[in-house]
Image: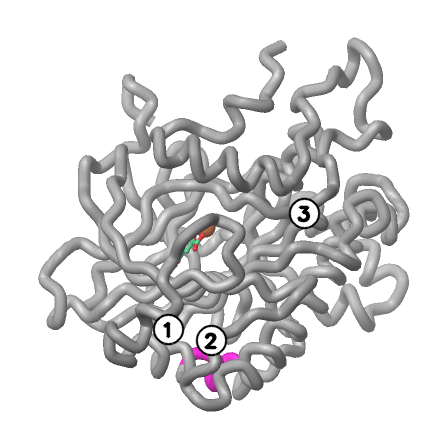
Amino acid sequence: MSSNGEPTSFEVQTSIPIIDYSLLTSGTTNERSKVVQDIGKACEDWGCFMLVNHGVPETLIQEMMDISDEFSNMANEEKLEFEAHGVLDPIRCSTGFNLDNWNKDTLWREYLRLIVHPDFNCPHKPLRFCEVAFDYVKRTRAVALELVKGVSESLGFEASYMNHELNLDAGFQLLAINYYPSFLEFDISRGLMPHSDHGLLTLLNENGVPGLEVLHDGKWVGMGGVPNAFFILSADQLEIFSNGKYKSKLHRSVVKDARKRITLVNLNGPSLDTIVGPSSRLVDGENRPLRYLPMKYSEYLKCQVRLITARKNPFDEIRIHI
Ligand SMILES: O=C(O)CCC(=O)C(=O)O
Ligand SMILES: [Fe+2]
C-alpha cells in the first residue's frame, strides 16, 4: 500500500488457492476433512479461491454465455422493457458509468440482474433464455449450497448449521450478467469499481476474457488462468456471520483486452428476511467480542446501494469499533 493507504501495484499471481469440489461431494472421509480445512484456510487467508471439478457442464456454461450475449446484442429499444428501477426489482437491465475512486477513472459496463431464487425471474427474450438460465442457476445454486456446508464445517459447526441459521432453503440468489464491450466498439475504459459483494459466497464464470482482480496484501491480483473453474469470492454476510474470521473480498474488474468480456455472477445469500449477525457460537465476551450489528438482509441490500452511491462502505453502518 502507498502512504495514503491506496493499493500501488498490480501483480498477476498464480498462488490463489485451488479447491477440488469433487472431494467435497465424493471424497473419502479423510479427503473431505482435508478439503474442508483448505476451504477454511482459503477463506481466511485469501477470501477467494478457484473451484475445479464442480460438475456444472461446460456446455451449459457456454450456452448461458451465448444466450447472455444474444440478450446484450438485442436493440436498445427491446431492452428498455427490462430497464432498472429499485434494487429489489426482479429484472434490472442497465448501462452505466461508475467512478473508480482509487484510479480516478470512469468505468463503463452494461448489466442485467435477475433475482433467480426463491422465485425465478428472467426476460422472455431471446428465445430459450429462461430455459437455459433456469438450468444454469439451479446447478450453480447446488454448488453454492454444498460449498456453504464445507464453510460451515470449516468454522467448527455441523455441515447444516449455516443453512439452518440463515434459512438458505429460501435463500436469495441474484444472477448478475456483466458486459464489458469490445474496445474496438467503445473507446473508453471498461470495468467495475472496487467493491465487495453483499451475499455469503459469489460464484463467477467469465467468457475467457480476463479482468477480475482481487485486493490481496495491498496489491491487485488477477484471478483466472485455471480452465473451467468457478471463481469464488467470500462476501459480506459471511464476514458478518463469522464475526470477521472470514473477510469479504474486495474485488474489481479492469478490462484491458480488446475483446468483449462477459461474466456470469451468482450472488448467494441468506433469505431476505433473515436478520444476519455474528453466530452466537463465535461470540464470547471479551475474548471474541461482537464485531457487527445484526441487520435484516433486505435492509442491508438497500443500505448497500445507498452507501455505495454516496461512495461509502456499507460495513461502516454495522461494524462495531472495538
Ligand atoms: O465482472 C467481473 O469480473 C466482476 C463483476 C462483479 O464483481 C459483480 O458483478 O459484482
Ligand atoms: Fe462483485
Q: Position of residue 241 (x, y in %)?
A: 72, 35
Residue beneath disc 3 = 272
Q: Give the range drawn in magenta.
A: 61-65
Picture residue at 66% right of the left edge, 73% below the top: 138
Residue type at mark 1: give it: Gly
Q: Is mark 1 on a helix, strand or loop?
A: loop
The residue at label 1 has a CB less than 8 Å from ligand 1:
no
Tell me where residue 239 sits by quadrant. Answer: top right
Q: What is the x, y in percent for residue 249?
A: 51, 42
Instruction: State the SS at label 2.
Output: loop
Q: In which quarter of the image is the C terminus?
A: top right
- x and y percent of residue 60 in the render? 55, 84
Q: Residue at (83%, 55%) from the top-left corner? A: 33
Q: Is the magenta stretch mostly helix, strand or loop?
A: helix
As drawn, 178 above or below 194: below
Distance, label 2 to label 1, CA atoms, is: 25 Å
From the image, which quarter does the N terminus lie in? top left
Q: Is residue 130 left or right of residue 40?
A: left
Closer to the camera in the image, 19 or 312: 312
Crowd rating for badge 1 (residues with CA inside 10 Å; few <14, some 14–19, many 20+): some
**In the rendered structure, which amino acid carries the disc numbered 2?**
Pro
Neighbor class of circle 3 (other Cα within 10 Å; few <14, some 14-19, many 20+) is many
Q: Name the residue under label 1.
A: 208
Magenta stretch: residue 62 in it? Answer: yes
Type of amino acid under label 3: Leu
Q: Does any portion of residue 46 appear in the rendered image?
A: no
Examine the structure image and report whether residue 196 is included in the region drawn in magenta.
no
